[in-house]
Amino acid sequence: MNESPGGLPPRIGPGEKSGFDLRDWLRTLRKRYRLILAVWIAAVAAGAVYTIRARKIYRASGRLVIWGERVRVFAPYADPFVEEWRPYDWWQTQIKLVRARPVMERAMKKVGHMLPELRDLRDGEGALLNAVDIRGERDNRVVTVSFEHPDAAVAAEVVNAVMEGYLEEQKSWREKTVEGTEDWLAGEIPKAREAVRKAEETLRDFQNKHGIFSADPSQIPAWIALQSISRREAELVIEKNRAEAALKRFEEGLRVPQGSIAAKAAKEDPRLLDNERSLQELRMKRLALSSSLAEGHFELRGLDKQIAVLEARRGEILAELAREMREEARRIELELADLKEERAKREREVERYTGLFLESERLKSEVKHARDRYEEVATGRFRSGLTSRGLFEPARVVERAVPPAAPFRPRPAQNITISAILGLFLALAAAFLAERLDDSVRSAEELTEYAGLTAIGMIPHIGDEDVPGGQKMAVSLSRPRSQAAEAFRMIRANLDLALPAGEGAFVYLTTSALPSEGKTTVAGNLAAVEALGGKRVLLIDSDLRHPSSYDAFGIADGMGLSHYLSGAASLEQIVQSGKPDGLDVIPAGTVPPNPAELVGGRSFDDLIAWARQRYHVVFLDSPPVLSVADPLVISRLVDGAILVVHAGRTGWMAVRKAKETLEMGKTKVIGAVLNDSSAEIKRYEGRYGYGYYRNYYYYGERGEKSERRRRERPESADAESGDPREPQT
């Protein structure tokens, strides 16, 4: 069994979906609408009462404009030119100064007699400081001063006093600051002028001494020469690379066959080209003669000598070429070394000139700083004179406060709206909290989940107005087409399927966990529908502690079960035939002093044995299981127990305890009947589409059958005949 902390069942069982179900929420709202309405009305009423009884408060406001200011002019006790505040910093500082205690002291002197509640305090200025609301608008430098008071005129006077106190404090502060400023500035002006003269003279002497009048370093001769050296170095590096590449190719040619050397050298030197041409001609001539002359002929020997001379000449030419290439490479290297020395020299000269240029720029910066300081001192003296004459004001009142015509608080519309919204939230929270804390069984699913019982039927609400004379016990007879009668017929069908067919009567115990759950109504109507189905039925009122009346079945009060069990009457005297045909009833009779002993006696056993032989179905209406011991004594003689549960009233723990108590006595609990479950039935109708039958079975005040919203269904012959019995399904 899945339980939540505190004994409350979780409303979402393991077999159910945990998603949001709007139908369940709406069902909760319909069920708790009285609580929701009560909480909401209470919240709105509380807001209205508060609004009516609240003291009216007026809010007056005035505005100051604070200009951006440089504080360096008004600080003779320090160097006023070292740091300059930004206008926004100044503005923020002034907003804080409006809230300063000296300002509030000046304001209290003006309006203290109007504020006795603050004047009598030990720290009245601090209280006024906390009561005044000061807010700044960054974009337009406007400061709004506000004050709230039950008297509109007092609120306006306090705001004006605060603004005037701030202006007076500013004026006093400026007067103290300006004292001695003009004398200090008068002494600073000659010093600043002398500093400018000395800086200009030092710069001029330096430029004349070193000849530096231009700030462009490209005009220095050493810099120009350095640029030329760089260009020449680049050219020599290219020439060196070419010479080294040519020498390398030439030396590689010496290591290949002679023909190749001659071919490559011929392309590079004319001398070698002529030698190779002559050598080639002699070789061709010797080749031509060798075919006709014998080897060793004098002509061939002469040609061989000439060829040897040319080959020797070729070697000399190649040696000369190699030597020339090496000398050219050496020359380039020597020139590069000379340029390197020259570069170092020129770089030292450029470095020296660079230091001179930097020094010149530093002197120029000192001249500019001296001139700026002189201008600032002169401007400061001018502004100091304006300030001393009151021609410069960093703040000004742009809008004086006037007494407001309407109160600032309370705000009826706003208060009522907030109360309504908060009341709605509180009402919903209270409804869902009450629903969450409510452990009563409300649906068939909860019966199964929390009590382990199967719902064999759900009975809608049966009001006294639904049946004539308030006879709920016989609603199946008086309203055979009603939704309640149909529910009892469905329970009858479920009971027929619950127990196997056999000889003798089926004895059912109809009981409940607690009193007033409708067990007698369920027992009576089940007996009626069984009798209408053609069976012989016996209804026994075994609740000897709280007997019921069976006037609806035509049964008169008189001799009953208690008389028979006590030996004061026979069976023939207590069994009464009622309506419909086939229904017999044994009323409880008078209340005995020992009900449990009577139902546990041999006479009651004989009664049940006699009933099994004469009837098809026997219903025993017994007291609640958890109230007295009678149901446990009676349960030993029955075939099954029907537990009646009042929907939305009976707690699931009580239902489960009743089931466990019956099972401890070896009694089979067939199932439970969920009584007064109109809300649950509507949920099923909306989910599964059974609303047609609820609309079909409707009755007016006279008890005559009427069909509402029949959806174009023709009337049946049974409806016209007025036969109260419904055709069996």
Image (tube, rainbow, N blue to C red):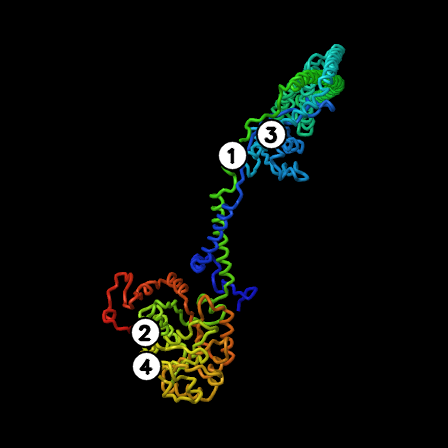
Of 495 and 317, the residue lying toward us: 495
Q: Residue 582: give its label.
A: 4
Residue 575, picture quadrant: bottom left
Q: Separation of disc 1 and disc 2 at Cα?
A: 76 Å
Is residue 338 among the parts visible in the rendering?
no
Q: Amino acid at mark 4?
A: Gly
Q: Secondary structure at mark 3?
A: helix
Sooner in the amino-acid sequence: mark 1 or mark 4: 1
Callout 2 touching callout 4 (CB < 8 Å): no
Q: Separation of disc 4 and disc 3 at Cα?
A: 101 Å
User: Callout 4: 10 Å neighbours few (<14), some, many (20+)?
Assistant: many
Sooner in the amino-acid sequence: mark 3 or mark 2: 3
Q: Secondary structure at mark 2?
A: helix
* Residue bearing the label numbered 3: 163
Numbered disc in front, either 4 or 3: 3
* Residue bearing the label numbered 1: 404
Give the residue displayed 63% in from the left and 37% down from the top.
128
Would you say 477 lies left or right of 288 here? Answer: left
Sooner in the amino-acid sequence: mark 2 or mark 4: 2
* Residue bearing the label numbered 2: 477
Residue 490, picture quadrant: bottom left
